């Protein structure tokens, strides 16, 4: 590991310039920052614009409207607890918003937003106590004592988001008031929760990954050590038992002994992200292996086709292996964000492009699904099957956490909108990495990338209509003397038909990563062509909820049937699909399918001789469209997994 | 309606002698009591013995061990709130236990149990305040104010169970200290919650049905009117909104406007039972129709094959129509008890034997499934698919409400064991009814029945091995001059092959009810023969969770595959059934099936080309056994719905 002085130097110079959200001291791949990877137009460019033009402002409006910023003023003015609003963790959404703004300012140099960020920080600063403690929910007369409720209090969780916001600020603008607040908070955490202090953990992991990143940013190894302590303590029953069981907050099994993700899915993902951060920085190969094994099992047995995680509304948790009901999918947006955090860290550590596959799937089918087309309402949970249209949430009131299937402008527990905002603002960083050898492009979006390699800086521009089309055009704009390696990910789903074209020659490439090692000339173009024809996916037979059903995917997009697109049928619940894809083209985002409606004999009891097969029902056509775009045209029913004609049970003759 | 004086007379004499849990002033059928219907041996006789010999004593032990009885002593001794244990509603489990004991004493004249009951009541009595208020959780210094939390406080719910216990006592022994306590509590409720008082309701319905029954018992119309007020107030948002939404406690839609049961399933069932009680007593035909319609929709679209209700762990609630996942079935034991309460009231009101069908299904496949074979542990939830064996709950500690799939001795929220106990103790009453015309037998168990009819009393003995065998032998032991009508229910599942034999002649009978109207001679025998061959059931095609799966039922029993009975396969999750039932006989409780194991290609991602169909896997045989008996032989996996060979999805060629 580098010396502290070197680390500080690096953090202050390189990182501040590059805007890298995650910067491990070592790993197979090096991160790039959002000033090194610029997205321009296309699918993700449009979403960054939506974030800049609507989502962040929407979040600013709502944290204000909900009184969550006023909580800080109220603390200063002695109006707490009377005037406190929001749940225990309301402070954290202000911090996550600030993180989103910080990355956005780093990306665009938006000076008006910068002024608003400074104003927010200035309202938070005076709430911090002499010893660094900072929270609006605890410690005052009439409030519970500080750290009296580690299970549910979220104090350390709030610091975690504060630290992440500070890292965003530090790595884009440099040390400012926010970084100073964070440093005092981090010192306070080490003081209070270090060896001999409160030897426990926070009910909601987040402080772990934040402390490691803050250690990376500041170069102070104390923060890393504190994160390590938090990771190691967990799983030994240091928190009390609760109705959901200790697995809810991963306090039932030590992190390095767990074999699969369990319990609250956001907690599980944040914890694993922190654990891999600790493992990398401490060269703890066992811990790295444990996390890799857990994620592998989780992806194989506990993840939705969208990349979504969490099968239980109860406890917002993972279910048992293969317990993945479409209509009760929790698949919290924040769990998707957490999965991206974890997979990105593992991509950096191992270089395995399979992690980038998961990131792609989750970005397109969870994160992109959350905000409405106008950026002013959000999915908290991301169901895979909407049985009933449901009612439209109020545009003016926060919704209960997960009660509505339609996007709501805000939630009583509103972690998701600000999580989407900070992810979109920092998205550039997730697209590409570098090594001494060269540049790796993992996610395809139009824009420009520069990367430090041995011998200088290389650069490319990427032109693509992905995922509408599968052609990705990479033009070298900057090169170095001698050989270097350009690596392009070939997604796992592109098992047949992906090609690479260079120097006028086209060759087939396999899923994984295709690398070109040679000298490059400025102006030369490499083209990756990915097969974008819609394709069927069948579920593992152990997923009972999906028996007899198929899904259609196109490129990285999971498609769905929305009732809006199938006016010929009663509801998506009665639709049965004929297994032939119609009007397949390699352009556009959807595909047409043929449907028959199953005939259901109404009776007073739903168990008997079974369905009428519906073989003679008229065939209608319906467009399958990308899942991320559903529910933007009014209340509807929707399903990703489509029952095949003839799959309904009948009693044997 | 009769005059008050007449009602009192009737309650004190007839009802006290008969031991009838429910006694509407009018209806198509009249209830019989547990002194009129005596169960001897057989399936339900064994369970009544288990209740008498183990379950009730087990509950006495645990309410004591948990400190829930001491709460009353602590109240008297001024040790509250410091010494209070249990949840808000802990008092209610003591009351439900007393109700169980009261019915049991009425059934068996167990004098030792009678002494214990009196001792319990004597500890409760001094806690009642001058104005009738009685609760260990509210109103003292350091406790929340009385009625300050109607949403979650359960004060009226506790009175409800107190009143039901008093009715049990009154109708078996007559007015005693418990009835006096209940009367003061009921008067207090009318005082405080009457017109001009607190015009709200309890978050958990129960007081409604209890007040009506107490009104029937005492003849005091005030209690009925108060119940009517509670029913009518509900659904207008009189309780606050909560995270689960107001539908959780049925405060979103007025009772008479609802079209289907929704929200917390126990609450929904108890409320509907109370509403039908009010409707019957006030001749409110609209309300009767509303409840009938709601139950009809609920049975057709929101009920498990076991009769179990509640598809969500989150909020312990009903799901959407046809959202009935086997592996997340909540199917709380208490919801089964509530369903029996409701269906019994509708059977009395309408005479429709379809309600007795539901009672039978729920008794055999929910209530009977809850207690272990030794009566010392219980299912709180009743899953239809156990994916993983799980761990054995501690025999010494209460379990979290619904975390374990194995029976636990007690729960932090322990409504179910005492609910099973009071149901089994009073079970006789649910077996048969009478009318001026004659006697109706709805549930088949060996024993003796006497019933008042016009002109005197008729009596029969029933001999049967039901449900092991399908023969029910009814011998007339007591008759009256002239014609009367003996009615036997032919269950809905007995659609082919049921026969009735009288006077040496056998004829086919159809599902519904078969009535014989004529003169009867003492000693003559009528035989009903029900077809007990195992039979397939296929699900409504809109139940996505059951696509490609079949269940096997035998008589009133739902069968299941438990891993214990299929040692040749890896787990029930991989078993695929061949659609031929082997070794079918008309005796015994199970049946043998042939299984193949599906081959699953292990991969890192569970969505791809689908299953290997497993057509060439070796065939093993396994016994399907009654669902109620599962998990009595150590940890296991289990499923009711069996995927058919070839039902697994594969990607189209």
Image: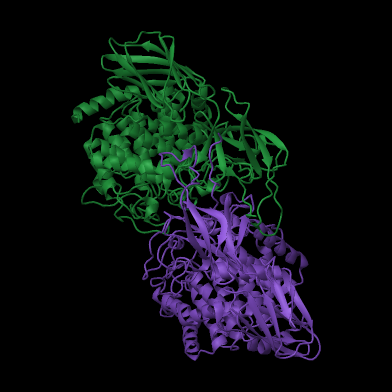
Chain colours: A purple, B green
The quadrant in which the C terminus of chain B is found is: bottom right
Front-lying residue, A568 or B554:
A568
The number of numbered discs placed on residues in the rendered structure image is 0
- Residue A642 vs B510, above or below: the answer is below
Q: Position of residue B64 (x, y in %)?
A: 49, 39
Residue B1 vertical position relative to residue B201 in the rendered view, above or below: above
Question: In the rendered image, which quarter is residue B569 located in?
Answer: top right
Task: Say if A490 sits above or below B622 in the image.
Answer: below
Q: Residue furthest left?
A: B3
Quadrant where the N terminus of chain B lies? top left
Q: For this view, does A587 lie left or right of residue A283?
A: left
Q: Can the viewer see residue A264?
A: no
Q: Nearer the viewer, residue A619 or B209?
A: A619
Q: Quadrant of residue A555?
A: bottom right
Point out residue A202 in the picture as x, y percentages from the top left corner. Answer: 58, 66
Q: Pick whichever, A251 or A454, lies toward us.
A: A454
Q: Residue furthest right?
A: A482
> For this rendering, which residue is in front, B569 or A247?
B569
Give coordinates of residue A201: x percent, y percent.
Answer: 61, 65
Q: Is residue A623 visible?
A: yes
Image position of A242 (left or right of B149): right
x%, y% of residue B385? 58, 43
């Amino acid at each position: 590991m580098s010396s502290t002085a070197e680390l500080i130097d690096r953090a202050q110079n390189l990182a501040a310039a590059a805007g890298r959200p995650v910067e491990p001291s070592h790993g197979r791949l090096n991160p790039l920052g959002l000033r090194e990877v610029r997205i321009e137009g296309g699918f993700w460019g449009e979403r960054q614009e939506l974030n800049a033009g609507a989502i962040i402002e929407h979040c600013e409006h709502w944290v204000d409207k909900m009184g969550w910023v006023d909580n800080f003023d109220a603390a200063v003015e002695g109006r707490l607890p009377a005037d406190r609003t929001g749940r225990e963790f309301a402070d954290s959404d202000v911090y996550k918003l600030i993180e989103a703004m910080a990355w956005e300012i780093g990306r665009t140099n938006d000076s008006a937003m910068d002024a608003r960020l400074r104003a927010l920080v200035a309202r938070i600063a005076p709430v911090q106590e002499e010893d660094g403690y900072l929270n609006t929910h605890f410690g005052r007369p009439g409030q519970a004592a500080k750290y009296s409720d580690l299970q549910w209090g979220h104090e350390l969780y709030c610091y975690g988001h504060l630290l992440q916001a500070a890292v965003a600020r530090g790595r884009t603008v440099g040390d400012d008031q926010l970084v100073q607040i964070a440093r005092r908070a981090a010192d306070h955490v080490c003081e209070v929760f270090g060896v001999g202090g409160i030897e426990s953990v926070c009910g909601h992991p987040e402080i772990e990954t934040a402390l490691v990143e803050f250690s990376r940013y500041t170069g102070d190894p104390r923060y890393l050590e504190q994160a390590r302590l938090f990771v190691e303590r967990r799983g030994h029953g240091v928190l009390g038992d609760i109705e959901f069981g200790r697995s809810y907050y991963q306090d039932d099994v030590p992190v390095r002994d767990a074999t699969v993700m369990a319990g609250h899915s956001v907690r599980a993902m944040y914890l694993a992200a922190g654990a891999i951060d600790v493992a990398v920085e401490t060269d703890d190969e066992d811990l790295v292996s444990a996390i890799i094994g857990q994620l592998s099992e989780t992806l194989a047995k506990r993840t939705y086709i969208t990349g979504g995680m969490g099968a239980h509304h109860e406890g917002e948790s993972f279910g048992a292996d293969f317990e993945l009901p479409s209509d009760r999918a929790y698949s919290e947006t924040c769990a998707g964000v957490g999965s991206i955090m974890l997979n990105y860290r593992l991509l950096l550590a191992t270089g395995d492009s399979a992690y980038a596959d998961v990131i792609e799937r989750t970005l397109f089918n969870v994160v992109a699904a959350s905000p409405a087309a106008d950026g002013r309402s959000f999915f908290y949970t991301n169901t895979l099957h909407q049985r009933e249209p449901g009612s439209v949430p109020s545009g003016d009131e926060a919704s209960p956490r997960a009660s509505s299937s339609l996007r709501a402008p805000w939630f009583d527990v509103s972690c998701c909108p600000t999580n989407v905002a900070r992810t979109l603002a920092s998205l550039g960083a997730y697209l590409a990495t570098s090594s001494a050898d060269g540049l790796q492009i993992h996610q395809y979006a139009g824009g420009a990338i520069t990367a430090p390699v041995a011998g200088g800086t290389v650069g490319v521009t990427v032109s693509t209509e992905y995922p509408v089309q599968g052609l990705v055009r990479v033009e070298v704009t900057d090169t170095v003397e001698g050989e270097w390696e350009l690596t392009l990910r070939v997604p796992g789903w592109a098992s047949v038909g992906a090609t690479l074209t260079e120097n006028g020659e086209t060759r087939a490439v396999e899923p994984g990563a295709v690398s070109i090692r040679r000298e490059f000339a400025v102006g030369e173009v490499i083209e990756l062509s990915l097969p974008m024809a819609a394709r069927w996916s069948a579920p593992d037979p152990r997923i009972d909820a999906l028996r007899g059903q198929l899904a259609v995917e196109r490129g990285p997009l999971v498609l769905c049937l929305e009732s809006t697109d199938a006016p010929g049928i009663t509801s998506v619940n009665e639709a049965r699909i004929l297994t032939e894809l119609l009007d397949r083209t390699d352009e556009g985002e959807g595909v047409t399918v043929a449907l028959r409606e199953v005939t259901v004999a109404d009776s007073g009891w739903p168990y008997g001789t079974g369905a009428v097969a519906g073989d003679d029902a008229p065939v209608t056509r319906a467009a399958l469209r990308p899942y991320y775009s559903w529910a933007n045209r009014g209340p509807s029913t929707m399903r990703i997994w489509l029952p095949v004609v003839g799959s309904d049970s009948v009693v044997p003759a």
